Image (cartoon, rainbow, N blue to C red):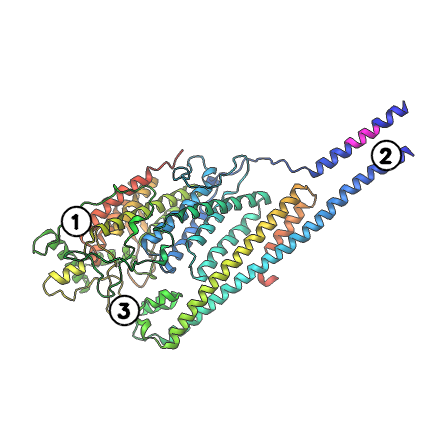
Amino acid sequence: MKLLLRPIRLGYLWLVVGILTWNSCQRDETVIPDQPSPTAYTAAVPLAYHELFLNLERFTPGYRPPVSARASAYVSWIGYEAIVAGTSGYQSLVDYYNVPNVPTADPDLEYHWPTVLTEAYTTALEYFFPTAPAEHLFSIYQTRTDFFLDFKQDLPQEVFSRSSAFGRELATAICAWSATDEAGHEAYLRNSDPTYQPPGGPGRWQPTYPDFSQALLPRWGDVRTFAADESDIVADPLPYDETPGTELYLQAEEVMEKVNEIKTGGLEEDFWIAQFWSDDCPILTFTPSGRWYAVANQLVVRHNMRMDEAVALYARMGMALNDAGVRAWHEKYRFNYLRPIDYIRAVMPDQQAWNTVMCPDGSGNYFTPNFPAYPSGHATFSAAAIKVLEAYFGANTGMIDRCHEGRSEFNGAPRQFQTFRQMAEENAYSRIPLGVHFQMDSDEGLLLGYGIGDKINQLPWER
Amino acid sequence: MGKVNVWLLWFVVLGLGSSCSQSSDIASQHVLFSIAHQRIALQCQLDSLHRVARQTWDNVADSLQQQLPVSMPVDERYNMIHVRNEALIKMFMVYDSLPETTQFMVEAAGEKDSLLNVSMRGIQKEVMELEKKIDSVLHQVRLQKTAQFESIYQALRAIEQQSCSSK
């Protein structure tokens, strides 16, 4: 009996040892908790990075409006893709665009969406602003450090690690895809094309007084769009005509008279409107496309938006602005229509020295954007942008735009709007008293932009 | 004798398991803390480069403040001084009329800023490599289910919270 028991006891002992050994070497069973969705978080992360974006596009040379719009589209879309798997209402657009090698979030594992988003935005901003001034580059890194120190306080290590890796890998994949768009890739390094010769001739655009800068981004129409296509065009512009009383003459006369009156101290509100929406002067403010991010940032705060809502809003906004820039520039160089300054100086009596009121440099000089007039880029950007805003907040919603509040270099006092459409219309109109566009540029820019905004809204964003 | 052997074996096994775990903890802890300190050191280098960039442009701003014509409009003057970027400073029409020494200073600052950008990117890349190493070691520690995981992780976070001045 004893002889029989001893082997059994020894066997039992080895079984216990085996269990202990196995147990000590076994990985933790991952318990999937009810993880918070992106809706559970505030918009602090997307807001911080889109505020950073505005500083980067303002202070990094080469980020003229369409270039900035393109960068914003990818950065914001990367943020959207980073958290979309955690949302209940949105869906990824990665397959829609056939973007290769984009990782997907494992539905059986927990992610901390603010961490995913922080790493995705950091990777994207670093990629799209490689020439950022050192102080601004540091701001990107510091924002990441600050958020991560905060997030790590309450996160299991494996969740943090998995989340940051996912955000980084996803952003890297989309950044790599963006580089396959040759016309847009690294365009901040080549704002002008030395091989481009404006066609010339009556009514055609040419470099304008006083700086006579080369044409800005003459081949931007070849850049990749997200929803707009070759059907997004404007009607033919007015035929060139110097005859008094013709429609073009009257539109030029309107520009001339408004500017001349502003220069003598009249039309105060028109001048306010012109300055309020200008955003033309590099350094002074963000770009006209960046302007709509400044508007979106205010709305995100005012409406206390949740992380997923803000991220989706920014993504749509970025794509709308990118497509508006691409199609507006395509059309600008299709028609190569002259700016009011050249018409007024050549045609209007006693106006050979006429100039705009755009970007005074203190020495008596004023400027005109260095690209063809028709259609207005400002109008196209704003119309596309407000279509996105209407989709989120409704067509009857308005706001007080405070994005230039406190500026002393120009009249940036806040302006109140009953609807977003009023904002777009006023933005488009602002180009006339500024002296840089005809009425037809603004009207057709708006129509072009509205159509593009609608197309962006119709993308398969929602499940 | 047989009873003694059984209990001896029992203690040996338990002891082996425990000592294995402890030595593993200590080794992992050592590696982790070393990497974490390296990471902090790199973070401090980044801070230092940021200070250099700031100082460089502060010096340019001081020079511009002295050299810009008094007739220059106040707001334009303010913008030129605060833009802190070579290419953007050169966009101001008054730039060409500045003394050569100031122009040279702006150009030198621009070159320095570009180099600082490259250095910062390099350091940040190293930071992220170290973060990956930390994640990898922590992952291994967690897989081994060592009792010390949580305390190691807490200690690591305490290191990460250190500022450069506290190092």
* Number of the label disc, if any, that sits on residue A362: 3
* Number of the label disc, if any, that sits on residue B6: 2
User: Which residues lie in the magenta part?
Assistant: A9-15
Majority SS type along the magenta span: helix
The residue carrying mark 1 is: A237
Q: Are marks 2 and 3 on the same chain?
A: no
Spot the residue most to the right: B1
Frontmost of labels 3 and 1 is: 1
When the figure is inspected, residue A96 is found, relative to residue A125, above or below; the finding is: above
* Number of the label disc, if any, that sits on residue A109: none
Spot the residue most to the left: A244
Q: CA distance from mark 2 to mark 3?
A: 96 Å
When the figure is inspected, residue A200 is found, relative to residue B108, above or below; the finding is: above
In the image, B7: left or right of B147? right
> Which quadrant is the N terminus of chain A positioned in?
top right
Circle 2 SS class: helix
Q: In the rendered structure, the residue with mark 1 lies on which chain?
A: A
- Which of the two residues, B24 or A363, is positioned nearer the viewer here? B24
Residue B134: give x, y in percent of width and height.
61, 50
The crowd level at tag 3 (other Cα within 10 Å; few <14, some 14-19, many 20+) is: some
Residue A258: give x, y in percent of width and height.
17, 58
Spot the residue most to the front: A195
Circle 1 SS class: loop
Q: Amino acid at mark 1?
A: Pro
Assess whether residue A77 is covered by the magenta stretch. no
When the figure is inspected, residue B111 is found, relative to residue A173, above or below; the finding is: below
Q: In the rendered structure, the residue with mark 2 lies on which chain?
A: B
